[in-house]
Image: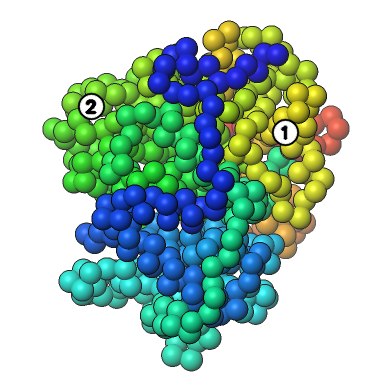
């Protein structure tokens, strides 16, 4: 069998082939860490540190409040939050009461939020005051019984709270006094009602829903278990033996994304690390936090590292504190890796950037470049207890070393299912004669004779912009729903910063003029239904959208046309 078990021992002798996995819940994993290191700092947020002891206390308080609200085991609760303390407290409190956390992007469009709430069947949600309006506008169309509203100010020290109120806080519209919501302060008071709240959950119980496009581009809830997250936390540290409790991770990757939630938050808290929580960042603020906090680990998408290279603020910065720099979410080009490795060397770091690979169907990363050995263009080796094999697309027939095929994954982080989509679950998760359940990723790659994997492209139609996955079919459905549009096609256009940016082509309905006003009306329609990161930067009108011989939209023709335009310019 070509899919040999993890060959880490050949390249890093202190990385075990097999791990004994924690069999409790995510909360129980954090609780065990807090008992070992109660006075260690779990996270820092805008100048305020929270210890592990305080973290567990806050989680317990929120769990009691959730029980008072009538939250039952198996209930879904939506968390639409940036990286802030309340998001962490609620994530683990939901786990503590046996409920399931549905993590969504707070910048999602109203209609997207409505879809997520209804698809998950959420009975409650928590979001920031600045996003209240979006929830208020669609709440009547959902089954939300309780909407909890918090503010960044709720997590700040008294001094910082005053500063926030005079600056960012002034931009947030006040919540109407008669709004049917529970404010954070009132929510926490509910914990005093004295209900029995703790629910025992097993490792294999569903715990988290993350949304992704699946294999067809239709947004689906990926159901992940306690073990999926806990196993990831153990695997990441096993493949980074230089990690020590108390090490700092710059947690800027978002909590609603597998990379941010699984690696930057849960892995750190499960193992006694210290998260530097960043609710919103620019490359400049990211660089400042990295230097100010002397972070030991950072994780990001290639566009972030590309932006750091261009920052004058980094001139003379001392990055000797770094133990690990991880790149994921999109392919790291060979040239960008070389440039960033030189950047690290020039700033006194003794390490190089390590590329990883994974899918939300396996929480996030399941493959990583070893510490002391990399191969140009490789995404590294699979984690302990994780298998990768390359097959003829859609089959279980393995291809020889060095031959391109579809990347398949198996291991302890593989999802439970696509919620409400048994047919696509069966298409994506397949049990082979080896007894393993394999994820058919739809990604193309090769494996060399030493087990190193090379990502070669995406078999499924998808745009990756600044690390976010954008599925053209979803955007085309939204465009086609507008009265002015007869037909549309969405493609990714190469971009030096975002890697790809989104462009839409539209064939207008009969009698509709191709004017700026028409374009603006369609753009306005898009803004109501499409998240900011997925918005088309331009709409180009076409008399005809090119088609293949079997009548499908020939999106590759449009991609080639755009490339030629870029070459000429």
Q: Are marks 1 and 2 in contact (CB under 8 Å)?
A: no
Q: Is residue 55 visible?
A: yes
* Residue 430 figure quarter: top right
Residue that badge 2 annotates: 349
Q: Nearer the viewer, mark 1 or mark 2?
A: 1
Q: Determine whether the residue tagged by mark 1 lies in a helix, strand or loop.
A: strand
Q: Earlier in the sequence, mark 1 or mark 2?
A: 2
Numbered tag placed on residue 437 in the rendering: 1
Q: Is 104 displayed left or right of 247 in the figure?
A: right
Q: In this picture, is 373 found above or below 48?
A: above
Q: In this picture, is 403 found above or below 409?
A: above
**In x, y percent, where is residue 105?**
51, 57
The residue under the point 29% across, 75% down is: 170
Q: Is 361 displayed left or right of 261 in the figure?
A: right
Quadrant occupied by the C terminus:
top left
**In x, y percent, where is residue 362?**
60, 39
The residue under the point 22% across, 59% down is: 47
Count of numbered labels shown in the rendering: 2
Residue closest to the eye, 41 or 477: 41
**In x, y percent, where is residue 102?**
58, 59
Mark 2 Cα-neighbour bin, 10 Å: few <14, some 14–19, many ≥20: some
Quadrant occupied by the N terminus:
top right
Residue closest to the eye, 412 or 208: 412
Residue closest to the eye, 347 or 272: 272
Q: Is 391 displayed left or right of 269 in the figure?
A: right
Residue at far front of view: 35
The residue under the point 72% across, 33% down is: 437
Q: CA separation, marks 1 and 2?
A: 40 Å
Q: Is residue 364 visible?
A: no
Q: Is 309 displayed left or right of 108 in the figure?
A: left
Residue closest to the eye, 364 or 304: 364
Q: In this picture, is 472 found above or below 385?
A: below
């Amino acid at each position: 069998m070509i899919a040999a078990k993890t060959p880490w021992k050949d390249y890093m002798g202190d990385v075990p082939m097999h791990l004994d996995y924690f069999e409790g819940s995510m909360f129980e994993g954090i609780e065990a860490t807090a008992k070992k290191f109660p006075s260690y700092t779990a996270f820092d947020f805008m100048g305020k540190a929270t210890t592990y002891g305080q973290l567990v206390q806050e989680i317990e308080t929120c769990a009691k409040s959730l029980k008072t609200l009538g939250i039952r085991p198996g209930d879904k609760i939506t968390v639409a939050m940036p990286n802030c303390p309340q998001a962490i407290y609620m994530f683990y409190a939901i786990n503590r009461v046996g409920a399931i956390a549905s993590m969504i992007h707070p910048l999602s469009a109203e209609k997207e939020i409505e879809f997520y709430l209804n698809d998950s069947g959420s009975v409650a949600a928590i979001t920031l005051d600045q996003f209240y309006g979006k929830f208020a506008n669609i709440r009547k169309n959902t089954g939300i019984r309780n909407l909890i509203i918090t503010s960044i100010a709720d997590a700040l020290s008294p001094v910082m709270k005053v500063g926030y109120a005079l600056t960012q806080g002034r931009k947030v519209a006040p919540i109407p006094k008669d709004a049917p919501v529970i404010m954070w302060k009132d929510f926490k008071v509910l914990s005093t009602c004295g209900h029995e709240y703790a629910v025992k959950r097993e490792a294999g119980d569903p715990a988290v829903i993350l949304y992704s496009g699946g294999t067809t581009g239709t947004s689906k809830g990926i159901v992940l278990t306690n073990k999926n997250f806990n196993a990831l936390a153990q695997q990441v540290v096993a493949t980074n033996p230089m990690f020590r409790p108390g090490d700092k991770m710059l947690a800027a990757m978002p909590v609603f994304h597998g990379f941010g939630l699984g690696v930057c938050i849960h892995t750190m808290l499960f193992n006694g690390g210290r998260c530097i929580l960043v609710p919103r960042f620019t490359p400049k603020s990211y660089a400042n936090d990295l230097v100010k906090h002397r972070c030991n680990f950072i994780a990001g998408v290639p566009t972030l590292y590309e932006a750091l290279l261009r920052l004058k603020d980094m001139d003379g910065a001392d990055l000797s504190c770094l133990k690990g720099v991880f790149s994921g979410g999109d392919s790291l080009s060979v040239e960008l890796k070389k440039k960033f490795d030189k950047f690290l060397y020039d700033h006194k770091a003794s390490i190089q950037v390590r590329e990883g690979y994974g899918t939300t169907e396996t929480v996030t990363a399941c493959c990583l470049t070893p510490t002391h050995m990399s191969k140009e263009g490789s995404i590294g080796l699979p984690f302990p207890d994780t298998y990768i094999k390359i097959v003829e697309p859609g089959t279980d027939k393995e291809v020889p070393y060095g031959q391109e095929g579809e990347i398949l994954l198996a291991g302890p982080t593989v999802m439970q299912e696509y919620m409400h989509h048994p047919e696509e679950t069966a298409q994506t998760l397949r049990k082979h004669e080896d007894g393993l359940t394999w994820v058919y990723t739809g990604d193309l790659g090769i494996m060399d004779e030493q087990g190193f994997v090379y990502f070669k492209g995406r078999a499924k139609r998808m745009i990756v912009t600044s690390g976010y996955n954008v599925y053209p079919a979803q955007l085309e459905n939204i465009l086609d729903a507008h009265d002015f549009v007869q037909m549309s096609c969405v493609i990714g256009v190469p971009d030096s910063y975002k890697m790809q940016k989104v462009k839409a082509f539209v064939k207008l309905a009969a009698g509709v003029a191709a004017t700026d006003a028409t374009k603006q009306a369609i753009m306005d329609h898009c803004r109501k239904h499409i998240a900011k990161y997925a918005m088309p930067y331009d709409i180009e009108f076409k008399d005809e959208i090119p088609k293949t011989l079997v009548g499908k939209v020939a999106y590759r023709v449009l991609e080639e046309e755009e490339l030629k335009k870029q070459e000429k310019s």
